Structure formats: C-alpha cells, structure tokens
Image (tube, rainbow, N blue to C red):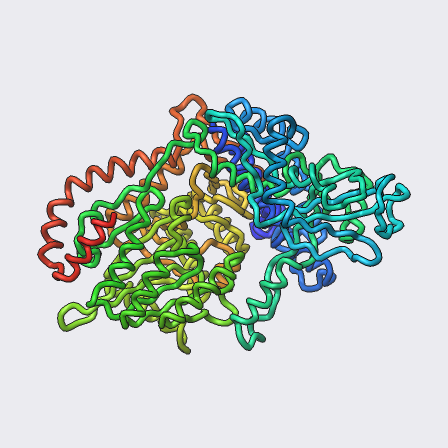
Amino acid sequence: MPDALDAPESYSNRELSWLSFNERVLGLAERSDLPLLERLKFVAIAHSNLDEFYMVRIGGLERELQRGSRAFEPGPDGLSVAEVHERAHRSARALGARLGDLYMDVLRPALASEGVVLATRDALDGELAEVAERFYRREVHPVLTPLAIDRAHPFPMLRSGSVNLALLVEAHPNGKGTAVRTGRMSHPGTLFALVQVPAVLPRFIALSPGEGRDRMYVALEDIVARHVADVFPGHHIREAAAFRITRSSDLDFVEEEADDLLATIRDELRRRDLGEPVRLEIEAGASEELTRELMSRLELGDSHLHRCRGPVAGKDLMRVFGEVQRADLKDPTFNPLPAPRLRYAASIFRAIAERDILLHHPYESFRHVVDFIEQAAEDPDVVAIKQTLYRTSGDSPIVRALTQAAEQGKDVTALVELKARFDEANNIAWARRLEESGVHVVYGLIGLKTHSKMLLVTRREGDQLKRYLHLGTGNYHPSTARLYTDLGLFTAREDMTHDAMILFNVLTGYAELPEMKQLVVAPFTLRQHILDRIDGEIRHAKAGRPSGIIAKMNSLVDGEIIRALYRASQAGVKIDLVIRGICCLRPGIPGVSENIRVRSILDRFLEHSRIFVWTHGGDQRLYLSSADWMPRNLNRRIECCFPVLDPQLRERILETLTIELADNTFAWDLEADGTYTPVAPHGSTPRRAQRDLIDLTKVRSKSEQASVRPELHKASRAAISPVMRVLEAQRRRQA
C-alpha cells in the first residue's frame, strides 16, 4: 500500500509530538498517588521543557517564517511551517495554562497543608512582612536598578529568561518627579518603568519565622514589588507585574565558514540571550494597559503572550524541591548499587579482561566509570587515554582524571563537542582547562556533532599493548547518571577496541572510515545498517522464520526508517517500540502499522537508553547506541552503535525490556490518531517498571556478590601490581 505509507495521516508532526510528550510530563504532576514534592518537581520540569521548546523549536519556526518558508521542507505529516507554528503556539499556551491551574489550585494548597507554604505577594503581612522587609533592606535594595522608559531612556535589551517587574508609575501629588512621559499610556500622567529582579539572589526566598518543620517561601519578585517604590522616590506605583521574555536561542552560524570554531561559538553565545523574542510571560493579574505596553515595545502579537497563574519562570520551583528536606513528601531515597564484579575487583582492568561487564544506570553506580578513568590516570602501565565528551558536570571527576593523566605524562586525547546545546559555555571552559594541563583537545569534525560516548584506555601488559573500552548510551556526567536510565558496556574484545581506535583516528585526523568489524557509526553506516536490519526481518517473516523488532529510544522522527517499519508491519513483523518522547510513527493503522505497538514510560528516572533487538530468524542480535532514529542523529552527528556479544548480558537487557513492556502504571500507549492513553492495570497486578528494576537489581546484586566475590578477590589480588595495591588501599580509606 504505497499510498498509505506516504499519506500525511500516517505521520505525526515532530513539534506537536514533542508537546504531547510534555503533556505526559504534566500528567505525572497531576497524579495524586505521587508524593507532593515529586509532583512539584514535574511541574518545574514541564516548565523547563517549555522554555527550551520556545527557545529552539518556536525560534526556528519563526526564523523560517521570516525567510518566507522557501527553505522549509514539510515533513511526512504535510504541515506547512505556518500551520505548525500556529498549532504549536496554541498547544503550548494551553499546556502553560494547565500547569498554572495545577500549581495554584491543587499543589500549592496541598503543600501548604503539609507545612510547605508558597506564599503570594498579598500574604506578606505581620511578622512575615517584617522578615521580608529586613531581607529586602539587607540583600535586595542595594542591587536594584530602576529603569525609566521614555524618549530619553529606550526599552532595554532584557536577557532571555530574566525575571523583571513592569511598572506603571505616577508622579506623587506632593513629589517632585520630573520623568518625561511617553505619551503612550491611556491614563494622563502615567509613566512606564522596569526593574530587573536580581539574578544573583535565589528566586524563592525562605522566610521561616516560626519553629518546627514549617517552611515558607516567597518569590523574590514579590518582595521587590512590595518595596519597589523605594527606588522611585517622589512617585506612586500604580501597578507592578512580573514578566519574563523568552528569546530564540539556537546558535545560527555556518560552521564550514568559521575560521576558529571555538571563537565563533563564544561569539554566538554572547548573542544567544539577545535573540529575537518569541514569548512574553506575564503574571495573570497584569492590566491590559501594562500588558499592551510591553507587547508593543517587544513587537509581539497575541500568540506570543502567556498570562501565568503562579510564578513566571516556573522551572525555578525546582529550587524549592531541592531545599525542602521532607522525606514524607518525596520518593524513597535510592542509592545506585555497585556492580559486584567491579566492587570486589582489585584491578578493574583484570575484571574487564576476563569478561564483558554491563552497567545499568542509575540502578548500578556510575562510580565504576569514574573509577575506570581514575585508575587509568594513576596506573603507571597505562600509556594512552582517548575519550569523547558531549556533556559532563561542572566540577567533573572525569575532567580531573584526564588532567591528572596528562600531567603524569600519559598521552591523553579528549574530543570535546563545543556545540552541545546549552552546555557550550561549560564545554569551552573545561576544554581550556584540559588544554592547559597538556591534554590534546579536539573539537570534532566540521559540520558534525560528536555525540558518541567512548572511552578507550591503552595499557602496557608485559611486552604488548592491550586496549580497554567503555561504550555508553548516555553522557559522562556523574549527576545525570543518577537521574537518567542508561547502559554502559566495558569490554576488552580485540575487534571492538580496534574499531574504537580506528574511529578515534578518523575523528582526530584526516581519514575515511574503513569497514568496521563490530561498531556501526553515523553518519557513515548507521542509517543503512538500520534499514538493512529491518529488511532482514521482512525477509525472515516472508520465509516463515522467526522475526521481530524491539527498539527503545528517546525519539523516532526519521521518515525513511518509519516507512521501513511500516513495510515490516505489512509483512507481518511484530514490532514493539519503547519511545519516551517524540514519535512521528502512528501504530495500529489498518493495513499499515497494525503490527506495531508504541509505549512511552515516564517515571521517576528519565528513560534515556537506546536498545535495538533484531530477532534475525532466531539468531538474535542486540545493539546499544548513543543515537535516536532522527535525521540529525543519522545524518549530522558522529554516533556509535555497538553489539552486546555476551549471551548473559543480552539476557539481562532482554529481561529489562520485558519488564518495561509490562509496565501498566507509568506507561502510555500511542494510538493510531497520534494521541496517548495511560495504560491501566485492568484488574491485573500493578507493574511499575522502574520500581521492579530497583528490586531486581538488589536481588541480582546479592546473587552476584555471593558468586563472584571470592574468585574475583583472589584472582585480581594475584595479578595486581604492588603500586596499584597501594593506590587501591588509599582510595578505599578515602571512601
């Protein structure tokens, strides 16, 4: 049915599918069975997601509209840029309104009943008002700057995301105000002014005059608003309303024309906060007069206006979640477990050499990855370390270890991706630190982002060199490794480590990628590999052999791959997709995709791993990858897809997928019309995949601990060098 495969109704729009994902995040905040502070956290996450959507997606759409849409190619859904822009604005505003209603009508009162009070401006009275005023006099007033807006004072270039107060000001009858009127106000004698809320202070201020566990927070802009007349002496403040501007923030430059990529990106970052405005958020009670004045100054239309119930910049509620230490209002604490094969190994290299090791984060500790690179930095037998870095933490132990290794004379190469969105400044900073310590820092290939996750260590063992490799689906970021579900593989297999060495040489030098033995690399071979695998399942199904596909990823957008999956469904291949976010494929369409099921799991941890299972006629193949099935991943990024060759590790991953596909409490099913419906237990036993995986990891850890501790301890101790024994003892004493 070729016509059906290309019909627009067989596809969902990327931007609208992303908004649907954020609705599911909001759905978590709406769940009454979750602890209250966890629900507040999801409100903050949904707000943060919307911010990025406007900065990147809406900003990009408006850039296309300004160009007249000449360069815009509609996706398989057939929507024009104007249609996508209008629908996205409408859906995003509705989503923002739902977030505000949930916060004001449900979560805020419920938290107050538990002693966590998020006070409004009007609630600042009595003793609380005195505490707020003392804070204002001590911390806020000295850093405030009043900004008159008139013919002598043009509207300032406000930074994207900054919180401000818009003011209608009148000269006091007994005052000596001399400000020049703009002539734009509807009330004679009314002046327009701004005050920027200090970004150097916390957004929510804890005011706790009482004893016990009660905690009261007030938004900083509310404290400023109560006392803002102090910076306009001789004037009366008729109205004060908090607002925030979101600007288009995607970097926009031609990489091939950049003489110095580092300098070009640094210059672009300076312009990011000063891009074209794409959204105006203003508190819901702001007058029409004040709102229209702002919109006129910013040259924004009604579609850009968001009236906020609750605080503007709702993402900052995450600070409240982090500060309030109330175990009864949060999920139970979970600490990642150590992997027994590594926990009791005196030498991590010996353990990897004996057998491939799989880590499932955050259920298993990312500390093992840090230990791997720290031991490599300290081990005198290690001669070289090569690593790709897309995102990492600000004070990263991995960066420290690379620095230490270089200072000790090892050959250290770090391939740093400068274009990791919203982490560019951080990456530039620690790339410079690495260079100063002697690390060879490479910024990747022109026109391509390096998104693969690879860490290769070369070690001298006797009269030969042996390589050890870590490959992952997620970033080398210790903090997010506690929040994101990802898989990492340690291996010393010659074919895989050789492929990794070749790939590093391609990324740092001038070379074409030769044929690889095990690794599959975008943009060179990954797209064709996926298409060939899908075609292989079609052939097996038609021949009556076992066939089937299980694929887990963050997003599925690529039209060519979606059409291949539709063809596989038509051939009778059963396909299970676990896709957290964007999915442009529509399952269950008669004659097109009735053999495809799509499930989205949103829970405590962010599902981030990419897993691809091909039945292959009964000779099953399983791959992990850093790449989603999106054009940007397959065409414009360096991505690495790698096989899991150890049968026991494959079984572990398949068990994980089975548990996730059985989730009936935190899963959503995608319908043929592009909408999602929550999966309900329907009388069966409630299954929550992430909770089940926590329990499974505990059971597996105890079992493996009993079996591997004696043999690993004895074998590793016999092989480890005296120097490494001393280093290991020091490390354990510090721990």
Residue at image position (71%, 36%) is: 284
For residue 601, above or below residue 262: above
For residue 727, above or below residue 313: below
For residue 274, above or below residue 327: below
Q: Report the label total.
A: 0
Residue at image position (27%, 69%) is: 408
User: Residue 540: horizontal and vertical position, in percent?
Assistant: 37, 51
Q: Could you say which is closer to the camera, residue 607 or residue 188?
A: 188
> Can you see residue 104?
yes
Q: Could you say which is closer to the camera, residue 602 or residue 200?
A: 200
> Can you see residue 536?
no
Find residue 502 and report its image quarter: bottom left
In the displayed structure image, the side of residue 591 where residue 283 appears, left or right = right
User: Residue 347: horizontal and vertical position, in percent?
Assistant: 18, 56
User: Residue 205: horizontal and vertical position, in percent?
Assistant: 56, 38
Residue at image position (66%, 33%) is: 121
For residue 520, above or below residue 98: below
User: Residue 632: horizontal and vertical position, in percent?
Assistant: 52, 60
Find residue 19 and report its image quarter: top right
In the displayed structure image, the side of residue 91 where residue 320 appears, left or right = left
Residue at image position (63%, 26%) is: 126
